[in-house]
Image: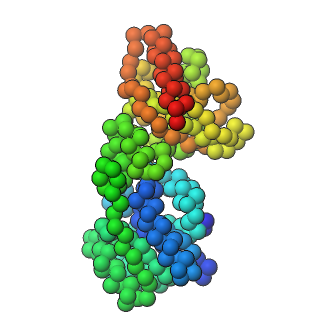
Amino acid sequence: MRIIRDYTYVTDADRGASVAIGNFDGVHIGHRSVIELARAAGERIGAPLGILTFEPHPREYFAPDAPPFRLMGREARAHRLEKLGVERLYEIKFNAGLAALSPRAFAENVIRDGLGLKHVVVGSDFCFGKGRAGNAAILQEFGREMGFGVTIATLLEGESGQVSSTAIRAALSEGAPRAAAAMLGHWHRIDGPVIGGEQRGRTLGYPTANMSIKGLHPPKFGIYAVLVDVLDGPHKGQYHGAASLGVRPMFQGEEANIETFIFDFTGDLYGANLSVGLIEYLRPEATFDSLEAFIAQMDADCLRARSVLAAL
């Protein structure tokens, strides 16, 4: 997969794709249905499959001080899109110039002239251009005028209603990772490098791999049964574990992170990249009267997590 970040300088080899347009936060099953429509259109017209998205997310650009909302970072999104067979990722910088384009200017400057797209697929709720003045029907009109095809995808309905990144965030905030997974089509994962911690877990018999969740929507704080993929290094592979997500009230933590204890594992993971999948919420964060009570609870948490994961 090739990543293109400047729509004003695109090689001939990277022009002419069939793309799905959107933010694709989480790459959920609704997103994948839109991607499949772009894939099918590309196969009909002989065009590579692409994604047109924006960095930073427009919501981050217009409200930089708002609480974190993203389900995944740009690297995790790119990795998942590549696994789906996306050949061109147009990850266009969202800035004042792009935000100021009228709907017509966006269609002309970005879609037609800049990227030379042959076909685009958007959801029926798609809006674009300054002030979100353009919609899917207007884009379809521009496509007929400017020579690119447009498919408007209907929004996907799940068992509990419309599938959306908003609904997935709500499920995670409620401590319902299985409900989130039903909409995502995969376990919700937190990806990133292992960072240095206080190494307190080692002294308690529970060494953990610590990862930041900065910039991501925080799932409900507490203890989870998790699946762990070590993505690189000598310990690369898949493991089971239990993770604490939150601020560690037992030790007066301040910045939220995720600390993962990997079952039956020995080795150094500092600097390695992990992908931690949230499987089941076990309990809220808590404080304890003694370290002995804390360790006893961790023993119980791990026993329950092993049972949950063995049943997958």
Residue that lies at the very extreme toward the right in this rendered image: 234
Left or right of 303, for residue 166: left
Q: Position of residue 145 (x, y in %)?
A: 37, 90
Q: Is residue 120 visible?
A: yes
Residue visible at 29% across and 75% down in the picture = 134
Q: Nearer the viewer, residue 173 or 129?
A: 173
Instruction: Assign the N terminus to one quadrant of the image.
Output: bottom right
Which of 147/98 is in front? 147
Residue at 37%, 38% (x, y): give it: 176
Left or right relative to 239: residue 250? left
Residue 84, x across and y down, in percent: 55, 60
Q: Is residue 308 above or below residue 101?
A: above
The image shows residue 137 at horizontal and vertical percentages of: 30, 78
Q: Position of residue 108 (x, y in %)?
A: 40, 84
Residue nearest the observer in this picture, 101 or 115: 115
Residue 61 against residue 103 in the figure, above or below? above
Q: Using the rendered image of the protein, determine whether residue 291 is visible from the camera's viewpoint.
A: no
